[in-house]
Amino acid sequence: GFCRSLPFRWQNRTNAQRRCQPRRPASNVSRSSVIFLIVVVSLGLGLGSAWIAARAAAPIDSLKLGSWSTWPNAGTADTDPYSRARLARNGELPLGAGEGLALYAKGDAEGKALRGQCTYVIEGQTPPARLWTLGLEIPDGRPLPTRENITAVGSESIVRQSDGSFQIVVSPRPQPGNWLSSAGAGDIRVVVRLYDTTARTLTELTDFSVPDIRLRSCL
């Protein structure tokens, strides 16, 4: 071809030699290394994201309502695999679709973490339910270390205002009215469990009111 048609003196020149030299195929070793690196990075990212989702404080499809968060898909067939792995890891047993819905709060109205040494006022109303309970837990779901005082109350025994709303005081010291003890606890969370409720769909949840959590004082 082109190289054979060049005079001998031109074939000895550097530029002609570069054009006439056959191209070498890409190194198989280099290409294999790149592919292996891509596979390793992809697996690392996939496993890492799954590990983070399984160890997250809340499911990835949870819904935020002011200070409260809830998980409408808990106990249903729509539960994502990451949330299933999270439940298997921490051993938490959510309410089924036919049982009710749980609301969790780890912070007050200003977003500050709830602490057992502080006094809080929980005031307002819960979404409609035939029965509900409100209690205190450690953030990972375990009960508070104190067993001598009341740490939970039910809708049938609570003292209400004339408009149907309620006011519950969370404090390490005894308080008048509806009082839940946080004595001996560090960080806490408030859990409202609604039984036989229609608050399952996104539209219904965003239309309902939830109790307000306000900080009164700290020791």
Image (cartoon, rainbow, N blue to C red):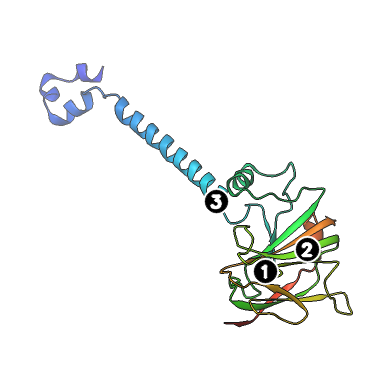
| CB atoms of marks 3 and 2 within 8 Å | no
Question: Which residue lies under the disc numbered 1?
Answer: 148
Secondary structure at badge 3 equals: loop
Amino acid on which disc 3 is placed:
Arg
The tag on residue 104 is: none
From the image, state whether disc 3 or disc 2 is nearer to you.
Answer: 2
Q: Residue at x 74, y 41 (%)?
A: 77
From the image, state whether disc 1 or disc 3 is nearer to you.
Answer: 1
Q: Bin the neighbour count of mark 2 within 10 Å (Cα to Cα): few under 14, some 14-19, many 20 and up.
A: some
Amino acid on which disc 2 is placed:
Thr
Q: 16 or 182: which is nearer to us?
A: 182
Q: Is residue 169 left or right of residue 163?
A: left
* Quadrant position of residue 200: bottom right
Q: Bin the neighbour count of mark 1 within 10 Å (Cα to Cα): few under 14, some 14-19, many 20 and up.
A: few
| CB atoms of marks 2 and 1 within 8 Å | no
Q: Quadrant of the N terminus?
A: top left
Q: Residue at x 72, y 43 (%)?
A: 78
Secondary structure at badge 1 equals: loop
From the image, state whether disc 2 or disc 1 is nearer to you.
Answer: 1
Q: Could one spot residue 158 in this view of the protein?
A: yes
Q: Where residue 100 sits: x, y (%)?
A: 80, 54
Q: Where residue 157 sits: x, y (%)?
A: 84, 69
Amino acid on which disc 1 is placed:
Glu
Q: Could one spot residue 26 in this view of the protein?
A: no
Inter-mark Cα distance, 3 to 2? 27 Å
**Can you say whether 138 is above or below 7 in the image?**
below
* Quadrant position of residue 209: bottom right
Q: Where residue 18 sits: x, y (%)?
A: 19, 28
Q: Where residue 155 sits: x, y (%)?
A: 83, 66
